[in-house]
Every structure is written in C-alpha cells, then in structure tokens.
Image: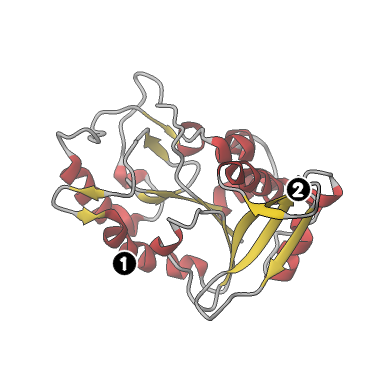
Amino acid sequence: MLLVLPPSRGQTPGPDGAPPLDLDALTLPSLTAPRRALLDALAGGPHDVAGSPTAPAAAVLTGVLFAAAELPVLLRSRGAAAARTHESVLVASPLLGVVRPQDRVPASRLAMGTAPRIGGLGPYWRPHLQAALAPLAAGRLVVDARSSEFLPLWRPPLDATWVAVKVEQQAADGSRRVVSHFAKHWRGVLAHHLLTRRGAEPDDARSLVRAARGLVASGAVLAVEHDGAARPGQPSTLTLVVA
C-alpha cells in the first residue's frame, strides 16, 4: 500500500539551531536535480528556505489532516505502525515534489502557483513525479487522500490499484453533501486507521474497503462505500459517510 497525502497549509517550523535542508538526505534522490533547480529559482524571494531550520515532515506538517493522522506519534511507536508510516506514506510538496514523513524539511508556504524562471509548478513537477513514483507504485494499491487540485500532479501507473478518498456528510433526513474542509480531518482519521490497524496491509480495493469498515465498527463513521473508476486511468472512489 502507498498512502498519498496532500500538502499541509498548517506548518510548524523546525526548532532554532536545527540543520538546514539537505537535499541529498531526502528520499527519492531522482528528484534531487529538480528540487535544487526550484530552490535556486526561489532564492532571494519570499519563499527562499536557504538556512531555514528543518524537522521531520511529520512534525512540520500540522494541518487538520495531519493532526488527525498523528504521524509523529506513529514514527515514535514500535512495530507495524512505525514501519508502515516509514514505508507507505508519501506527502505531496509544492517545494520538494514529494517527501516521506521522516524526511527533514523546512516549513514552506509555497503554493501550487508559479515560480520565477520555472513557470507553473504543476507542469514543472508532473514529469519528474511520474518518473520517480511510477516504479514505486507499480502493481500496488495507492490510497490517494489528496484533494482534487493535486490529483493531476501524479497519476499512478495503469497496473496500480488507484483509489481516491471522498467524504460525504449525511443529514438527519438521509440526504448527503460532499464536505470540503472537514474532509481533511476524516482523511487523516482514515490514514491513522490504515497505519495502525492490526493485520496485513490492504493490497487491493476489496481489502481496502474491509479495512476501512473498521471505522464503522468503531463508530467513527456511518458507512464506507466503494465505486469503480469512471474510465481507465481514473481512480475508483472510497467514500466515508459521516454524520
């Protein structure tokens, strides 16, 4: 299983005196060159992170989804949860493309807009992420908790099982509506559940649905539903129904 998380708007900088960003120490070294080119383009501007203190991404990213996922706690734990967090989680980053929770990163408010001499960050990162992540995702279950604006940045290969996560709120009369802000919280709840539950990791859509239904048994969500992909190359959808 690969669990792909979005960037976080809420961030906490690394402590004073912490080491600055070391590109050579990050996972996915095939992204080192495009990471360096973007950092060079941002030098001297408002998003220049040269010299900024770093901390593990799990500690820097503190938005709604990450608060619910509790990645720092999982990294400090022992056993399967820590191993899954190290090996299964990828976090999208406008600054660095994608990182692991244990990668030391600076806080950065860079959004998916444009950068000097680079242009649009979406078109910039897309080919680099496709090349770096396709071998990692080949033949695997990809649970995609990114919001719709980040889905086009990277599409898993066709031999992967790609499942996007959606959240719907059910009213007292039974009607439903798609939720946006609170969806981040519930995606984080799902991430925490998948990383900490007992048993083998899900490896296909059916086992993912079974795993996610543990949230129904615990009373966290009302229902879990799965809908197939609309067409090849698109994700199927895992929907969490909440009150």
Label at residue 135: none
Tell me which label, 1 or 2, sits earlier in the chain: 1
- Image position, residue 142 (x, y; %): 57, 64
Residue type at mark 2? Ala
Q: Residue furthest top?
A: 16
Q: Which residue is mark 2?
A: 171
Can residue 48 be seen at all in this image of the molecule?
Answer: yes
Along the viewing direction, whichever of 97 and 77 lies nearer the viewer: 97
Q: Which residue is mark 1?
A: 127
Along the viewing direction, whichever of 120 and 4 lies nearer the viewer: 120
Q: Secondary structure at mark 2?
A: loop
Q: Residues within 10 Å of mark 2 (few under 14, many from 20)?
A: few
Q: Residue at x 67, y 49 (%)?
A: 190
> Would residue 165 be found to the left or right of residue 95 on screen?
right
- Image position, residue 76 (x, y; %): 61, 34
Residue 146, placed above or below residue 219: below
Q: Nearer the viewer, mark 1 or mark 2?
A: 2
Q: Check the picture and name the quadrant holding the C terminus.
A: top right
- Image position, residue 227 (x, y; %): 68, 70
Residue contact at pointers 1 and 2, CB within 8 angstroms? no
Residue type at mark 1? Pro
> Would residue 224 be found to the left or right of residue 13 on screen?
right
Along the viewing direction, whichever of 12 and 233 lies nearer the viewer: 233
Q: Splitting the image into 4 quarters, where does residue 121 fall?
A: bottom left
